[in-house]
Image (cartoon, rainbow, N blue to C red):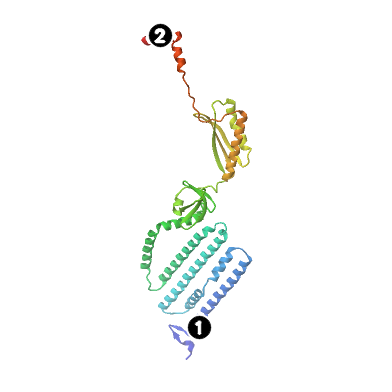
């Protein structure tokens, strides 16, 4: 009897040999292709600083043998006529291998992103690395959970509806229990991605101000001007109005000054021009306007507006001081007095009034006044 004519599951030995050869050829080709890709991208990664080669090298290196084996078996099986149950199990195994391999590639992608982020921002913003690692860990857990659910869903006879429902209910319960923590965690993620501020920025939150020195998973810490550390929950911080002075390109300055009502008209007309000349003579300033604004209770008020072309607060104070000194010097030279709150008190001389009443003129005035009243 010719052994090549032996039939098993409606397939003769020749068909089985052909299927086996197809399986072996497929796995060898895929394995060789994997080795070629690893060698190529490894060499290109050493020759170039492009991150794409590192990513492709990581993806090729993490392509596992079980995936290649299951794909090869699936290719060889396509040449055979076998029972439906066996086909179902082999197909499910192949799908499971693909899903697990996709999860491994997704994990490699997260790892690649984390390394790239650390390489770019480790020296710029080292405190943020803790949050980034936590986010990457959460992403890996999600990938693993999704992969396990998909693998179970593709296994014959496995029903995952109840499992997914229980996970959903459990997830809702956990989310309600740690609602504040999750709120701060997502707020931390928003700070990382949106960057309303970074380490070293000087910010004002409501009535609190200081320099950002740490951005964590739950809190952000700010060093105040008086030295103490202010701790803000990330969720509460993003709900507030944040004023970031580090990103201020220029500073608008408005100040007023008052002169006395005895100031001459020609001086009042000249004061805006004098102030404009003083401001424009200084570096890093841009004059906007100066006007005789109003008649005050005790002063003639002038309003002056200019811009400091540097966000540094100390530079602004140096410029304002120079302006104040120059204005004082000019007013001193022109003999113009600065106004300050004053009151005029009129004193009555009672003895003089009494002497006036006893004179003839006073008597006549009183008589005339009395006649006028009778009339």
Q: Is residue 22 above or below residue 345?
A: below
Q: In the rendered image of this protein, does residue 170 appear above or below residue 285?
A: below
Name the spot of residue 189 as percent of width and height, x first. Answer: 48, 57
| Point 38% across, 10% down: residue | 370
**Would you name the residue on which mark 2 appears?**
367
Point out residue 342 in the picture as x, y percentages from the top left corner.
50, 28
- Local secondary structure at mark 1: helix
Q: Nearer the viewer, residue 103 or 13?
A: 103
Specify the quadrant that holds the C terminus: top left
Residue at point 44%, 56% (across, down)? 184
Crowd class of label 1 (few under 14; some 14 to 19; many from 20; radius 10 Å): few
Q: Residue at x 57, y 64 (%)?
A: 52
In the image, residue 205 sits, relative to residue 67, either above or below, namely above
Q: Earlier in the sequence, mark 2 or mark 1?
A: 1
Residue visible at 48% across and 64% down in the picture: 137
Residue that numbered label 1 is attached to: 17
Front one among 361 and 37? 361
User: Are dots 2 and 1 in contact, CB under 8 Å?
Assistant: no
x and y percentages locating residue 57 in the rendered image? 57, 68
Label 2, secondary structure: give it.
Answer: helix
Q: Position of residue 11 (x, y in %)?
A: 45, 83
Graded by Cα atoms within 10 Å as few (under 14), some (14 to 19) or many (20 or more), the crowding at tag 2 reads: few
């Amino acid at each position: 009897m010719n052994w090549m004519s032996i039939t098993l599951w409606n397939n003769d030995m020749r068909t089985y040999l052909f299927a086996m050869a197809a399986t072996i050829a497929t796995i060898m080709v895929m394995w060789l292709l994997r080795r070629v890709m690893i060698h190529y991208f490894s060499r290109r990664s050493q020759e170039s600083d492009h991150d794409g080669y590192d990513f492709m090298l990581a993806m090729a290196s993490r392509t596992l043998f079980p995936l290649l084996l299951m794909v090869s078996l699936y290719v060889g099986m396509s040449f055979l006529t076998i029972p439906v149950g066996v086909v179902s199990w082999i197909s499910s195994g192949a799908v499971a291998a693909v899903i697990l391999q996709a999860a491994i590639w997704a994990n490699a992608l997260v790892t690649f992103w984390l390394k790239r982020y650390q390489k770019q921002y480790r020296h710029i913003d080292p405190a943020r690395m803790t949050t980034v690692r936590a986010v990457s860990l959460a992403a890996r857990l999600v990938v693993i959970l999704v992969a396990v659910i998909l693998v179970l869903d593709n296994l014959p006879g496995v029903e995952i509806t109840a499992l997914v429902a229980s996970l959903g209910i459990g997830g809702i319960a956990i989310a309600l229990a740690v609602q504040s923590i999750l709120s701060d965690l997502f707020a931390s993620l928003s700070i990382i991605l949106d960057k309303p501020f970074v380490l070293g920025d000087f910010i004002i939150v409501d009535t609190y101000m200081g320099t950002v020195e740490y951005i964590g998973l739950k809190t952000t810490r700010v060093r105040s001007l008086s030295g103490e550390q202010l701790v803000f929950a990330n969720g509460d911080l993003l709900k507030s109005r944040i004023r970031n002075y580090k990103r201020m390109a220029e500073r608008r300055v408005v100040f007023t000054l008052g002169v006395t009502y005895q100031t001459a008209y020609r001086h009042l007309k000249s004061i805006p021009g004098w102030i404009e000349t003083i401001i424009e003579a200084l570096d890093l300033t841009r004059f906007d306007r100066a006007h005789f604004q109003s008649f005050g209770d005790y002063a003639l008020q002038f309003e002056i507006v200019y811009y400091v072309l540097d966000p540094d607060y100390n530079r602004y104070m140096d410029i304002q001081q120079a302006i104040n000194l120059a204005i004082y010097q000019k007013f001193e030279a022109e003999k113009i007095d600065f106004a300050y709150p004053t009151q005029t008190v009129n004193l009555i001389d009672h003895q003089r009034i009494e002497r006036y009443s006893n004179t003839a003129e006073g008597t006549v005035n009183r008589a005339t006044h009395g006649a006028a009243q009778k009339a």
